[in-house]
């Protein structure tokens, strides 16, 4: 079934959940790798940017795709029923699960937008890639004359996304495993197989 019901996640929701999770699993190490390559270039005063540009193309493109898929996912979510949480959960547990999900959705926007803003603010010329296109428009003004927030400001936000995201994601995965192993309900199963 494509659509969600009052008790199950449909194919679209499930595939989007796991596809985005897989893209995040690629995107985070790519981000750190990109940073390491950049620092190496600076440290060795090298001008061979080819590897940095290649990793950047993949990181930017994948990040924009996550942004697009998250928008589709939320649109799908509000136009579909949402499966109810299992009966028997305490009020604080429902609240914690909901809060975690809201945070995860917020991060899925804050992550790519802050990355995009980081490069938009950069005072030099660095391409913002989307597949073969290397001239994605800026979303914040370039920090040329000191009157606008600089690269570092948005880079800090981008990095904070990861620090917060790590904790929220750990909580999310721990919650899913707790349902599966301790409570033995169908919460993880219905996200994997639908019922
Ligand atoms: C869900 C999407 C994204 C995730 C999970 C993500 C994750 C990361 C991570 C983990 C890092 C290394 C840690 C850090 O220095 O902050 C990083 C660095 C970076 N990312 Fe992303 N990123 C995403 C989207 C984007 C997009 C769309 C762009 C640009 C179009 C971008 C541009 C950058 C830049 C410029 C850096 C280096 C920042 C610095 O100098 O510290 N990111 N990203
Ligand atoms: C091993 C990794 C993961 C596991 C085991 C997992 C498990 C689950 C499960 C079982 C649910 C269903 C909860 C319910 O039925 O009420 C869920 C929902 C959700 N997951 Fe994950 N997840 C993982 C990774 C991720 C990642 C990487 C993200 C995003 C960054 C994410 C974002 C979400 C969101 C936003 C929801 C709420 C869906 C909604 O209510 O619309 N998950 N996850």
Image (cartoon, rainbow, N blue to C red):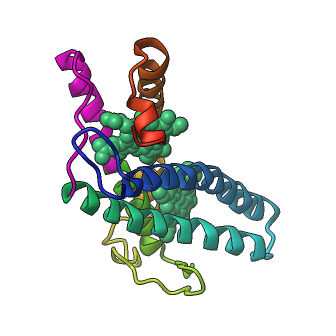
In the displayed image of the protein, which residue is found farthest to the top? 182
Using residue 53 as the reference point, say whether residue 95 is left or right of it. Answer: left
Q: Residue at x 22, y 34 (%)?
A: 84
Q: Is residue 18 above or below residue 174?
A: below
Residue visible at 82% across and 62% down?
44
- Which quadrant of the rendered structure holds the N terminus? bottom left
**Residue 103 visible at all:** no
**Quadrant in the rendering for residue 42:** bottom right
Residue 37 sits inside the magenta stretch: no
> Residue 147 falls in which quadrant of the image?
bottom left
Q: Position of residue 117 (x, y in %)?
A: 40, 67
Residue stretch in magenta: 80-105
Residue under the image location 51 percent in, 48 percent down? 21
Q: Nearer the viewer, residue 7 or 188?
A: 7
Residue 126 at x, y = what percent?
Answer: 57, 78
**x, y percent for residue 159:** 48, 48
- 81 lies above or below 86: below
Say which quarter of the image contains residue 86. top left
Residue 182: x and y, percent? Answer: 45, 12
Question: What residue occupies the far front of the structure in this picture?
Answer: 1
Q: Say if the magenta span includes residue 103.
A: yes
88 or 17: nearer the eye?
Answer: 88
Residue found 37% across the figure and 53% down from its top: 13
């Amino acid at each position: 079934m494509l659509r969600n019901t009052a008790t199950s996640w449909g194919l679209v929701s499930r595939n989007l959940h796991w596809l985005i999770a897989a893209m995040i699993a690629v995107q985070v190490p790519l981000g750190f790798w990109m940073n390491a390559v950049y620092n190496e270039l600076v440290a060795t005063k090298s001008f061979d940017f080819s590897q940095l540009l290649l990793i950047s193309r993949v990181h930017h493109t994948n990040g924009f795709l996550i942004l697009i898929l998250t928008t589709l996912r939320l649109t799908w979510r509000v136009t579909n029923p949402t499966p109810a949480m299992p009966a028997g959960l305490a009020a604080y547990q429902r609240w914690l699960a909901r809060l975690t999900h809201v945070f995860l959705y917020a991060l899925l926007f804050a992550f790519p937008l802050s990355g995009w803003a980081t490069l938009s603010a950069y005072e030099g010329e660095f391409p913002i890639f989307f597949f073969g296109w290397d001239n994605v428009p800026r979303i914040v003004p370039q920090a040329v004359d000191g009157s606008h927030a600089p690269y570092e400001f948005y880079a800090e936000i981008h990095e904070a996304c990861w620090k917060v995201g790590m904790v929220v994601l750990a909580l999310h995965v721990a919650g899913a495993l707790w349902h599966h192993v301790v409570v033995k309900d169908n919460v993880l199963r219905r996200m994997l197989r639908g019922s």
